[in-house]
Image: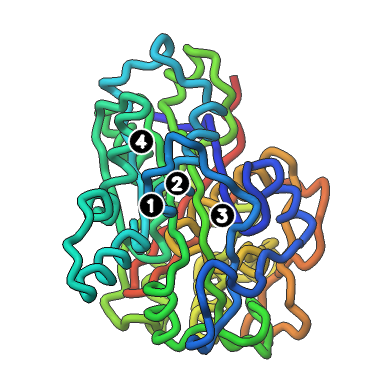
Amino acid sequence: MKVVITGMGAVTPIGTGVAPYWENLCAGTSGIRPITGFDTEDFAFRRAGEISDWNSTADLADSDRATQLMMTAAREAWNDAAWTPNTIDSRRAGIVLATNFGGVLSGTRILADGLSGIAACDADVAEYNFQSCADRAASTWSLYGPRVTLSLSCSSGTAALGCGASLIRSGRVDAVLTGGFDALSPFCWSGLGALRTMTHDELRPFDERRDGTIFSEGAGALVVERLEHARARGATIYAEICGYGLNNNAYHLTAPSKDSAGTTGVVNMALRDAGMEPRSIDHINAHGTGTQHNDRSECATIHQVFGERGRTIPVTANKSILGHTMGAAGSLEAIASVLTLRDTIIPPTINLEQQDSACDIAVVTAPTSSVPVTSVLSISAGIGGTNAAIVLRGKPAA
């Protein structure tokens, strides 16, 4: 059974909406800037990919900021897919969302009130629930199929997309709204800083001088459907989800296993699921966090899976521009991969000035037009050792 992508939505540090996101990604316009949403005086790291050109709608005013970001992206994807009660059976439409921190700002208010002796506000308690965003989306669009919320660290967005495709393949649903999201807050910033994986410099994937990542906020949404269902209702079909893999390292909280077994295994799993050989992949959207261990581990995986071709397959790392959008990363990178298939343009990896000799891969550092890309591999690896990978191919032939 073929599963296709028919709608996309994005809220990012470089633009709200898929069109501005893609334009700025291709231009290499960095979204990293000083944090303004909360006081950073007591924090060691004070820059992030913060969303500034975005306003919520009135119907979301009572929601946590993270939910507002996700619902804004989901609304764009919903409208892009042109779902209506007349074109889908809502009993066979599901939702899979993913997040690292959920409604953390609401949770922070609960903690602050508790320390002040104030009883927790019922609204904040409801919004802190990780399920609250999926609940709201399901009720907003009457999605009566499976409703799933995942929290798999930095592989969350890719896992949500793969889980949605798996639900369709199982025959349980015809269509699924998928997405990943996270918002910045003092609480999550404290925890992320304690991991000691952030940099005061630029985020430099695969650069000899890289010394860490920079975290960001955002949301990405993708509508996935059974191919026959999408064709029957005349939907726009962007790409096919051919294969998906999910595993874990069972090794360390932040460091990948030294033999790269986890990421190598998940990439091979996705290729097997797609029924494709490594030589079929034309482009890799890398996890590319800019940390010493992750970048080298990912490059080792590319060489283990692709052999000599690992030195020539075009690779890009969207996080160099966006920062690491946590739960949204895999979803936003999947959107970029779909648009690469559509427009045959690979967005650049910025801040790469002196490539690490141990990262012997073909990193794209300037926008490249008219690249023959028919299939893309997108890789995600999360804190805690969860890995996910997805294989995408251009729109299936009629």
Task: Tell me where residue 339 sits by quadrant.
Answer: top right
Residue 333 has which mark? 3
Q: Secondary structure at mark 3?
A: helix
Instruction: Name, please, the residue furthest toward the front.
Output: 117
**Mark 3 burial class by Cα count in 10 Å: few <14, some 14-19, many 20+:** many
Residue 211 has which mark? none
392, above or below 75, in the image: below
Residue carrying label 4 = 137
Q: Looking at the image, what colour scheme do you see?
A: rainbow
The nearer-to-camera label among 1 and 4 is 1
Residue carrying label 1 = 64
Q: Mark 1 or mark 3: which comes first in sequence?
A: 1
Total marks shown come to 4
The structure residue drawn at horizontal position 60% and vertical position 25%, both measured from the top left corner, is: 397
**Mark 2 burial class by Cα count in 10 Å: few <14, some 14-19, many 20+:** many
Asked whether, in this view, residue 306 is left or right of residue 105, the answer is right
Q: Nearer the viewer, residue 145 or 74?
A: 74
For the question of whether residue 375 can be seen, the reply is no
Callouts 1 and 2 close, C-beta under 8 Å = yes
In the rendered view of the protein, which quadrant contains the C terminus? top right
Residue 68 has which mark? 2
* CA–CA distance in space, label 1 to label 2: 6 Å
Where residue 206 appears, as percent x and y from the top left, is: 64, 79
Residue type at mark 1 is Asp
Residue type at mark 4 is Ala
25, above or below 134, in the image: below
Q: Secondary structure at mark 2?
A: helix
Callouts 3 and 2 close, C-beta under 8 Å = no
